[in-house]
Amino acid sequence: MKLVRPVLTVLMCCYALCVVYATSKPTKGSRIHHEKPLSSHEHNDEDHEYDHDAFLGEEEAKTFDQLPPDESQRRLGIIVDRIDEDKDGFVTEAELNEWIKKAQKKYIYDNVDRQWKDYDTNGDDIISWDEYKNVTYGTYLENPTEEEGYDYKKQMSRDEKRFKAADKNADNDADREEFTAFLHPEDFDHMKHTVVQETMEELDKNLDGFIDLEEYIGDMYKGDEEDHGEPAWVTAERDQFNEFRDKDKDGKMDLDETKDWILPNNYDHALSEAKHLVSESDADKDGKLTKEEILNKFDLFVGSQATDYGEALNKHDEF
């Protein structure tokens, strides 16, 4: 049995090392999850590069950039059928929003695909909690001795809670979507409570169910061995806590205040883009799109003027 530390744990260890070796430098903001932009291009009406990146994801958009208009339109038709999840012949704003979010997460799904076989040990295309536990904690389970500075039992318990939260149908197995939510909880709305709860449990050293000022600062700054005094950025973080983090001014952050800190209410770029695509393509103004309406605006969704498309035509068997 091998023992593989969970992805989040490895990241947190790296984070901790950074703090140890750079205690005089600010690490503020490292726990805050900001929404990834849909595209590096500006959103304007002169060209539709932003729309292409948003609708397809940047990597897939590069492939479509190499296609002639007729092939681009044909592939768009296949995509439309996928977006129309209820198969009623219309693409709604909600369905477009969901599609765009999935397109933006493609790099996450690719990451899961690379790890899948490591955890799906019986090859049934499902990962059970026992499979994940045995792969990740196998050595510890066989010989439950603690490694200095690392609590396997506590981490395994945390992983099990997260696995159950990701397991929407509560069958103790994870399909690819559920396993993706387990590995990348910050990217799934139904997992965000779990992200907040894990953060609170990690920082709440006195186990009172809250994050007080010293626990908040202690997560970022461990002190200066040469005793040069507290850096200015730490003082600024204390002010941030008192003025903005601790909303009810009781000297500590509860679950809701912690959520506002690490998961700020970002502008919903995917929903905004879905609204934009519907507005630009909805010829009969009924608030939803037919396949014909989308194909008539294929240049907005996927179109390109490129002609060097020979290599791209040989990619992506799904088309």
Image (tube, grey):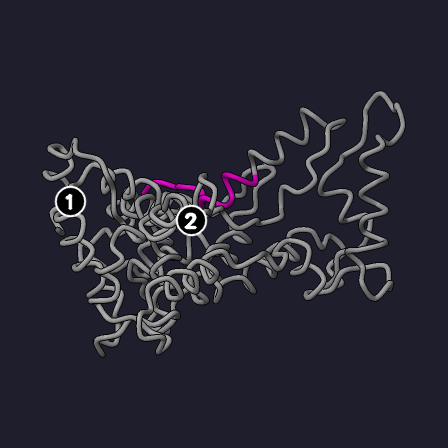
Q: Is residue 155 magenta?
A: no
Q: Quadrant of the N terminus?
A: top left
The residue lying at 38 percent from left, 67 percent from top is 167
Amino acid carrying mark 1 in the image: His
Where does the image place residue 238, in percent across and percent down from the top left? 84, 45
> Which residue is at a point 16% across and 59% down the rendered structure image?
78
Q: Which residues are magenta?
A: 1-12
Determine the secondary structure under disc 2: loop
Name the residue carrying label 2.
45
Residue 214 appears left or right of 294: right
Where residue 274 sits, quadrant-wise, is bottom left
Identify the disc placed on residue 167. none
Residue at 26% x, 74% y: name it. 90
Q: CA distance from mark 1 to mark 2?
A: 29 Å
Disc 1 versus disc 2: nearer the observer: 2
Looking at the rendered structure, the number of numbered marks drawn on it comes to: 2
Q: Is residue 114 left or right of residue 242?
A: left
Other-residue count near label 1 (Cα within 10 Å), few / some / many at <14 / 14–19 / ≥20:
few
Residue type (three-letter) at the residue carrying disc 2:
Asp
Please say whether residue 160 is visible from this viewpoint. Answer: no
- Quick check: 29 above or below 289? above
Find disc 1 in the rendering and name its residue: 316
Q: Residue at x 76, y 60 (%)?
A: 253
